[in-house]
Amino acid sequence: MSIVIVGSGFSGLGMAIRLKQSGIDDFVVLERASGLGGTWRDNTYPGCACDVESHLYSYSFAPNPKWSQMWSPQAEILNYLKNCARKFGIESHLKFNCDFQGASWDESKKKWIIQTSQGELESSALISAMGALVEPALPHIKGIESFQGKIFHSARWDHGYDLEGKRVAVIGTGASAIQFVPAIAPKVKQLHLFQRTAAWIIPHPNRPLTAREHRWFERFPFLQKLWRLRIYLMHELSGLTFRHPKLSGIMKHLSSRYLERKVKDPELRKKLTPNYTIGCKRVLVSRQYFPAVQRENVELVTEPIESIHATGVKTQDGKSREVDAIILGTGFNLEEIHGVKKIRGREGKSLWEIWGPSPRAHLGTTVSGFPNLFFIFGPNTGLGHNSVMLMAEAQMNHVVATLLYMRRKNALSIEPKPEAQATFSEYVDQRMKRTVWMTGCKSWYLDSTGRNSTLWPYSVGKFRRRLRGFRPGEYLIHSNP
Ligand code: NAP
């Protein structure tokens, strides 16, 4: 059985490792860039780190006893991924500079015909591990193209541009900006931070992990497992507040108290106070952000942006701020998520033509009419409260179980029954209605129809249990006669 995995980020690489560990060796990992790592390769902005603890934001099957900090920085995470590729023998399966351009299912051959920048491939199974937060979203602000200074997005940081002594505008105050603003604020001459919506922020007690802790984790792996379990359970517990918005008062209290303690100026505090239910947008974690915003050379601007001109940013009150550079912390464009326009199924239609703007997949992993296509981080498998690695691993294991079943039964193709997929979708949508993510804020979790097609509305434990093994009754299976 030949398999093509698209993407060599956390999920693509993990999928490759799990295949290898299961005795499936006939696979290739397509990667459009010249190195692996996905989001951890692309996001190199100053201060970039994971906001989930490293002992949980890593593969369960590849524990790293030597994380330098509880929340480790980007370079270390990228290094971890490179080490995993080496350790598990994945390097020879990686095809770099190979852009996935499209795939269509050939029913007569029962194969995927895959177009890449390096030619055509055929495979029995196609595993999409392309990630969601890939393409920078460039804001549609009047006059942005007329700006004469330096402009770049946080996910395409220009390290060749020296920010020392510069006047800088930062647009956006999301998960990325909250990390790079404190890192660049001491360098720049003046930083104008344009905030459209205030974020709920909680502090995280990051600290270096000591040499003694490293030794203990190395010598007694079960201690590291316990440590990981502790983090997992804490996050699962916090998940209750996202699923039952009435419980969000506790988290709101913690966040509000933190803001009160750290920001003394009532005017600034008011600007930094969110106006939506905590958790509706991603809750941000930082101990550096509030001090940075209160620096003499930092101005928090909440007046909406009117336009950008050759030398600066103009707000709706008519005031113009002259800057040398604009940094966009404006998030990601999800229009092409899951390769919707590139993948064509049995009827020759693309995922986009089937789904429209609201993707749906059985168990977030397979799609009716698209045989032998699997998603890692598919629709409704994101999390707002725990490590997405847990979801990705559950999907990887489910894919392996499916492929092994197919091998045992000599099956040529599988796809979910339409009714199984519809039942699962209904199960997700019904529970989603009562979560905090549907309390009225505008977030990237919602698609253009207003449906939350991004997140999983139950506990991680529930997802893992639901995806355990392969349930043949839910699938259409075509075997060799
Ligand atoms: P984001 O959370 O989508 O934030 C984008 C920011 O830009 C928001 O403050 C948004 O304001 C603002 N914005 C967008 N368009 C604008 C416009 N035209 N004018 C003014 N402001 C505008 O993007 P992100 O910070 O890059 O984070 C995206 C996701 O990446 C996160 O939710 C998270 O899942 C992931 N991430 C994770 C980590 C990690 O540590 N694990 C770190 C960084 C990012 P509004 O809120 O008003 O829309």
Image (cartoon, rainbow, N blue to C red):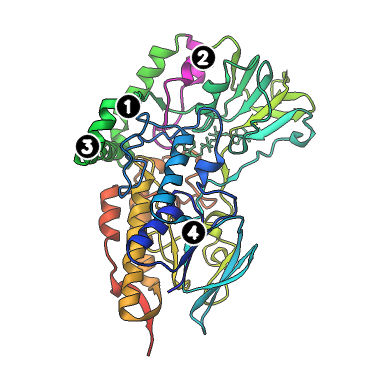
Q: Which mark is residue 219?
A: 3
User: Which residue bears the numbered disc 2?
Assistant: 268
Q: Which mark is residue 58?
A: none
N-terminal label among 3 and 4:
4
- The residues colored magenta run 265-291
User: Which residue bears the numbered disc 4?
Assistant: 92
Amino acid type indicated by mark 4: Ser
Distance, label 2 to label 1, CA atoms, is 35 Å
In the image, residue 473 sits, relative to residue 92, either above or below, namely below
Whether residue 269 is in magenta: the answer is yes
Look at 60% across and 12% down and name the residue there.
297
- Asked which secondary structure carries label 4, the reply is helix
Graded by Cα atoms within 10 Å as few (under 14), some (14 to 19) or many (20 or more), the crowding at tag 1 reads some
Q: Nearer the viewer, mark 3 or mark 1?
A: 3
- Count of numbered circles on the image: 4
Mark 3 touching mark 1, by CB under 8 A? Answer: no
Q: Is residue 196 left or right of residue 49?
A: right
Whether residue 427 is in magenta: the answer is no
**Residue 108 point in image, percent of width and height:** 52, 85
Amino acid type indicated by mark 1: Leu
Give the image quarter of residue 1.
Answer: bottom left
Amino acid type indicated by mark 2: Leu
Look at 37% across and 28% down and name the residue there.
69
Q: Which mark is residue 209?
A: 1
- Asked which secondary structure carries label 2, the reply is helix
N-terminal label among 3 and 1:
1
**Residue 384 point in image, percent of width and height:** 39, 41
